[in-house]
């Protein structure tokens, strides 16, 4: 009896459709990813004349990327592992990298949608218009920034097995990033601590996004933020992948 093994492309397409259906059926994380940045764009309109439009857009986009990486990817992977879905997929003739690539592709699509939403609302409501180069560079920076939070999410699910614990850790981390990122630089007086906050994952992503929206203002600190972000991705993803277990047992 001959056994037919499907092509990798066919398997990926099937998994992608299944993951997309899961995303559409569980729209809460997607709504959060878009809703919170919109609040920033609506409520911070008055600050544009003080801090500049790109800074407001960068803050909104940075917060949305956190939600995609932590509330979206992390909880999705943790929930499916807890339900034994990954264990069943591994029994099938499916390369493990295809399983995770399908998940990450969904998140990359969400990053693109989020970036477009921020651009559109930023222009229509806040009147912020970037140069063509600013839009293009920001798209690439958004993907890099999203990779920082996706790798952080991978680190969390790699080190922690219990779904409830992961749920609590992601929410606390999300809250801390928002609070420290949005007001930390203003409230913290210690110079060293302030610099640490500035080049934290949130700080680096915000710096990159703000400079990406105005490429002419790309400075040395932006380049440092890019390099540190790449370092975050390598460390977080490296540990998260090496420690990841396909089941909770």
Image (spheres, rainbow, N blue to C red):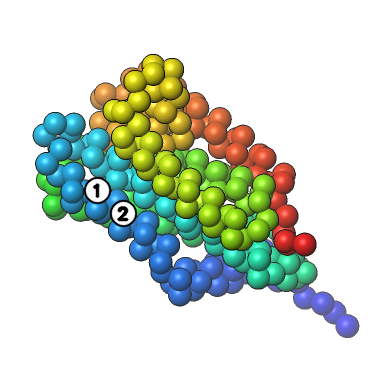
* Marks 1/2: CA–CA distance: 7 Å
In the structure shown, which secondary structural element does the residue marked by tag 2 occupy?
Answer: helix
The numbered dot on residue 40 is 1
| Label 1 with label 2: CB-CB less than 8 Å | yes
User: Relative to 249, is 209 on the left or the right?
Assistant: left
Task: Determine the residue positioned at 45% across, 31% down.
Answer: 200
Please, is residue 164 above or below residue 37 in the view?
below
Q: Quadrant of residue 16?
A: bottom right
Q: Quadrant of residue 79?
A: bottom right
Please, is residue 145 above or below residue 35 in the view?
above
Residue 92 placement (x, y as % from top left): 75, 70
Q: Nearer the viewer, residue 21 or 193?
A: 193
Q: Quadrant of residue 242?
A: top right
- Crowding at label 2, few (<14), some or many (≥20) Cα neighbours within 10 Å? some
Which quadrant of the rendered structure holds the N terminus?
bottom right
Residue 81 placement (x, y as % from top left): 66, 64
Residue picked out by circle 2: 36
Please, is residue 10 above or below residue 142 in the view?
below
Do we see residue 7 in this rendering? no
Do we see residue 3 in this rendering? yes
Task: Determine the residue positioned at 62% across, 52% down.
Answer: 157
Task: Determine the residue positioned at 24% across, 53% down.
Answer: 39
Residue 4 placement (x, y as % from top left): 77, 75
Q: Nearer the viewer, residue 3 or 14?
A: 14
């Amino acid at each position: 009896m001959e056994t037919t093994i499907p092509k990798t492309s066919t398997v990926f397409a099937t998994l992608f459709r299944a993951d997309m259906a899961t995303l559409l059926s569980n729209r809460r994380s997607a709504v959060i990813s878009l809703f919170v940045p919109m609040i920033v764009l609506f409520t911070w309109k008055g600050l544009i004349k003080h801090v500049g439009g790109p800074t407001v857009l960068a803050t909104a986009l940075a917060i949305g990327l956190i939600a995609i990486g932590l509330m979206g990817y992390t909880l999705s992977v943790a929930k499916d592992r807890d339900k034994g879905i990954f264990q069943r997929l591994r029994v099938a003739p499916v390369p493990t990298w295809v399983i995770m690539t399908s998940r990450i592709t969904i998140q990359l699509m969400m990053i693109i949608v989020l970036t477009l939403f921020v651009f559109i609302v930023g222009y229509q409501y806040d009147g912020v218009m970037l140069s063509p180069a600013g839009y293009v560079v920001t798209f690439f920076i958004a993907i890099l920034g999203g990779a920082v939070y996706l790798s952080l999410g991978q680190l969390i699910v790699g080190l922690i097995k219990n779904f409830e614990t992961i749920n609590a850790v992601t929410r606390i981390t999300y809250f801390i990033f928002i609070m420290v990122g949005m007001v930390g630089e203003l409230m913290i007086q210690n110079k060293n601590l302030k610099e640490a906050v500035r080049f934290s994952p949130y700080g680096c992503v915000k710096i990159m996004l703000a400079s990406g929206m105005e490429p002419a203002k790309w400075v040395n600190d932006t380049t440092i933020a890019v390099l540190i972000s790449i370092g975050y991705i390598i460390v977080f993803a490296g540990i998260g992948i090496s420690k990841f277990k396909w089941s909770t047992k």
